[in-house]
């Protein structure tokens, strides 16, 4: 039997960098073995503003995970947040060239590459072209055209771009941290992998990841990605509002939010007074839980209104009966689901990442959706196509598979 091998992911967020190391057995099943988490300070609103600080956070998270596992990691899949993320859907068509008119992987590559030729703002870089569906001789909705017979192959892809500088900085911090990056994945796609049900994607749903610095959004419709975008306003804004409104230090405001915050003032049943430090840290004041909730609610409403506006401006005109799914640390605030329900007038649920065996309960929260989803994406191809590992080194095979999987997927 082939020996077990490791796979690592690093999720780079505004408030934390998380490294996960999983062990893949001969059947391609993954077990989480190591986790390392470091508070991040080098990222503001999802953009890297302190290269050295981010490098340190990546190294420290990896080291923590490596220590648990007793194995050194050189390669990882990296998920990241980008407030500059944008998307568009593009179509292209090619003629099937071989004499039998049987569609080959080369035809598919040609048509996908052709969809990437699309005008985007000059400061942006296309990072993914994800097939939505193919059309063969006028028959649309084809998921996998390879082997089908036809003379005309069309593809519709979802193109995702981020700012050139975001991408260059990501490459810089990962390479300085000594990482060989197998693939860069937008965190929102990783979160989608971890929490969305196929039925939701089919019906049409909106996923919102509320991170510390950025809210990222994605719409799935008829089973495929329709829109990806971001709003540079995250959960940290709530902390800032509390700090200003209550004249208290940021650290106190953060503690208050996480320990006693509620996003809907009318959900506060027994109003009580909480002790809060003043700005100088020299004195204490009493503030009511109702007042704290009112400050949070105002900002949460505004955040979801911005998200609703982004959806309206996305060009999506369909319905979203699959509802709204919330992930990210911001989804952990009690009452946030109810506020989203009011603003979107849709069913809303909080997305809890599942799908991996052996997850400790403290990881089964919306905060870790993107890190867990990145690990799930990394091993997905392998799980779907287990094969004989004799001959080629298992890890090289896996890396090869991951690379081809992502180039197919994206
Ligand atoms: N239990 C909790 N209740 C309320 N808020 C929480 C809780 N836990 C974390 N948060 C908030 O969630 C935010 C962090 O979320 P998350 O870890 O998803 O962000 P990130 O991935 O680091 O950032 P981004 O995705 O914007 O780059 C912080 O602002 C924090 O205050
Ligand atoms: Mg995040």
Image (tube, grey):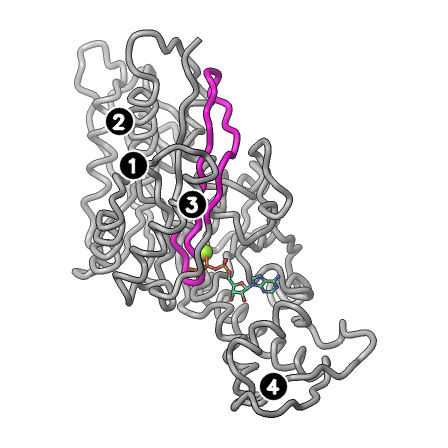
CB under 8 Å between callouts 3 and 4? Answer: no
In the picture, the disc for residue 277 is: 4
Whole-Å distance between the Cαs marked 1 and 3? 12 Å
**Mark 1 or 2: the one toward you:** 1
CB under 8 Å between callouts 3 and 2? Answer: no
Q: Identify the image quadrant of residue 253.
A: bottom right
Pick out the residue farthest to the right: 270
In the rendered structure, which disc, 3 or 4, sits on the residue that comes first in sequence? 3
In the picture, the disc for residue 108 is: 2
In the rendered structure, which disc, 4 or 1, sits on the residue that comes first in sequence? 1
In the picture, the disc for residue 74 is: 1
Q: Which residues are magenta?
A: 11-36
Residue 109 or 11: which is nearer the viewer?
11
In the rendered structure, which disc, 3 or 2, sits on the residue that comes first in sequence? 3
Q: Say if the magenta span includes residue 387.
A: no
In the rendered structure, which disc, 2 or 4, sits on the residue that comes first in sequence? 2
Residue 39 in the image: state x and y as whole percent.
Answer: 44, 60
Q: Which residue is mark 3?
A: 19
In the rendered structure, which disc, 1 or 2, sits on the residue that comes first in sequence? 1
| Location of the N terminus (image quadrant) | top left
- Name the element at disc 1: loop
In the rendered structure, which disc, 1 or 3, sits on the residue that comes first in sequence? 3
Number of numbered markers: 4
């Amino acid at each position: 039997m082939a020996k077990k091998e490791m796979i690592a992911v690093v999720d780079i967020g505004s408030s934390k960098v998380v490294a996960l190391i999983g062990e893949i057995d001969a059947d391609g099943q993954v077990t989480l073995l190591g986790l390392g988490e470091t508070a991040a300070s080098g990222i503001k609103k999802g953009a890297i503003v302190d290269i050295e600080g981010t490098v340190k956070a990546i190294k420290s998270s990896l080291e923590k995970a490596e220590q648990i596992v007793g194995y050194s990691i050189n390669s990882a899949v990296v998920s990241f947040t980008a407030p500059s993320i944008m998307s568009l859907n593009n179509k292209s068509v090619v003629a099937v060239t071989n004499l039998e008119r049987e569609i080959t992987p080369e035809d598919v590559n040609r048509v996908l590459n052709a969809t990437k030729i699309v005008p985007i703002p000059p400061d942006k870089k296309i990072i993914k072209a994800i097939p939505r569906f193919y059309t063969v001789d006028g028959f649309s909705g084809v998921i996998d055209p390879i082997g089908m017979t036809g003379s005309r192959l069309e593809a519709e892809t979802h193109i995702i771009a981020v700012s050139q500088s975001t991408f260059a900085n990501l490459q810089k911090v990962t390479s300085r941290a000594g990482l060989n990056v197998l693939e860069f994945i937008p965190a929102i796609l990783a979160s989608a992998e971890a929490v969305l049900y196929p039925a939701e994607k089919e019906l049409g749903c909106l996923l919102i990841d509320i991170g510390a610095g950025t809210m990222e959004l994605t719409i799935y419709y008829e089973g495929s990605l329709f829109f990806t975008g971001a709003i540079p306003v995250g959960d940290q804004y709530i902390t800032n509002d509390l700090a200003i409104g209550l004249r208290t230090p940021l650290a106190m405001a953060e503690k208050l939010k996480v320990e006693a915050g509620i996003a809907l003032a009318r959900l506060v049943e027994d109003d009580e007074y909480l002790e809060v430090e003043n700005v100088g840290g020299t004195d204490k004041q009493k503030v009511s839980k109702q007042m704290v909730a009112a400050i949070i609610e105002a900002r949460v409403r505004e955040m979801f209104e911005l998200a609703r506006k982004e959806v309206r401006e996305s060009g999506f005109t369909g319905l979203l009966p699959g509802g709204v799914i919330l992930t990210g640390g911001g989804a952990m605030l009690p009452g946030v689901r109810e506020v989203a329900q009011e603003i979107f007038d849709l069913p809303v649920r909080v997305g809890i990442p599942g799908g991996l065996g052996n997850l400790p309960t403290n990881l089964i929260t919306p905060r870790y959706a993107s890190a867990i989803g990145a690990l799930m994406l990394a091993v997905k191809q392998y799980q779907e196509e287990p094969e004989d590992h004799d001959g080629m080194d298992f890890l090289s095979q896996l890396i090869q598979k991951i690379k081809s999987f992502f180039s197919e997927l994206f």
